[in-house]
Amino acid sequence: MEALQPTLIVLGAGRGSRFHGLGHKLEQRVGAETVFALTLGHALATGLPLKVVTTEPLLPLVLPLVARRDVLVLPDPQTDPRLGMGYSIASGVRASLDSAGWLLLPADMPLIDAPTILRVAQELPRHTVVYAQHRGQRGHPVGFSAELASELMRLTGDEGARRLVARYPGHALDVDDAGVIQDFDTEADFRRLDNRALASGAA
């Protein structure tokens, strides 16, 4: 019988409140693709079971790529203080309880390569918590073993899973992939990416 795999949960239901440009930050384009589409492309390339947590306005970015059964649509987090990153994580875990664990991947981290995600997944059977780390800086994805299911499902609000990472011994997986620490929250983040692209095109 094929061994159970961890489920990769892509978290794309946040407010994006630090981004003050036009539209949601996940709708912004990095080259020809949106941030959300790039992240989903890497997630799908892993071949891991997938759950995408998002909101109704962002569905058009998701459904061309991901089967509807693997998409969880949550209310706008501004409508209820209980909603937020923690609630998104709990929803994704609750929808995939037959998994061997879970990898959490924020949708605003489009530069993480699929092989990096798979390396974290491969380490998870030996650890309670695993996270990718680049040059000593903790990043994503973060993996949680199945034994933490009940605690993950109790998460709520915007806290996320930080307290679980702090409570349990975490295994840092050193990777060369700088994408594990590069999220896109502000207009300045996107400008830096554009400048890097221009510099690399001129080289």
Image (spheres, rainbow, N blue to C red):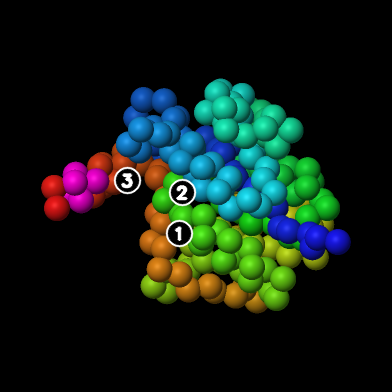
Q: Secondary structure at mark 3?
A: helix
Mark 2 or mark 3, which has the lower sequence index?
2
Give the quarter of the image for residue 177: bottom left
Q: Residue at x 32, y 36 (%)?
A: 31
Q: Is residue 203 left or right of residue 139?
A: left
Q: Residue at x 46, y 54 (%)?
A: 112
Mark 1 or mark 2, which has the lower sequence index?
2
Q: Nearer the viewer, residue 192 or 39?
A: 39
Magenta-drawn stretch, dominant element (helix, strand or loop): helix
Looking at the picture, how far across and down is residue 126, in whole percent? 70, 76
The type of residue carrying mark 2 is Met
The type of residue carrying mark 1 is Val
Looking at the picture, how far across and down is residue 15, in whole percent? 52, 35
**Residue beneath disc 2:** 109
Q: Nearer the viewer, residue 178 or 1?
A: 1
Work out how far the residue at label 1 is from the one at label 2, CA to CA, in angstroms: 7 Å
Do the numbered discs 1 and 2 sit on residues whose CB atoms are within 8 Å? yes
Do the numbered discs 2 and 3 sit on residues whose CB atoms are within 8 Å? no
**Residue beneath disc 3:** 189
Q: Residue at x 78, y 43 (%)?
A: 95
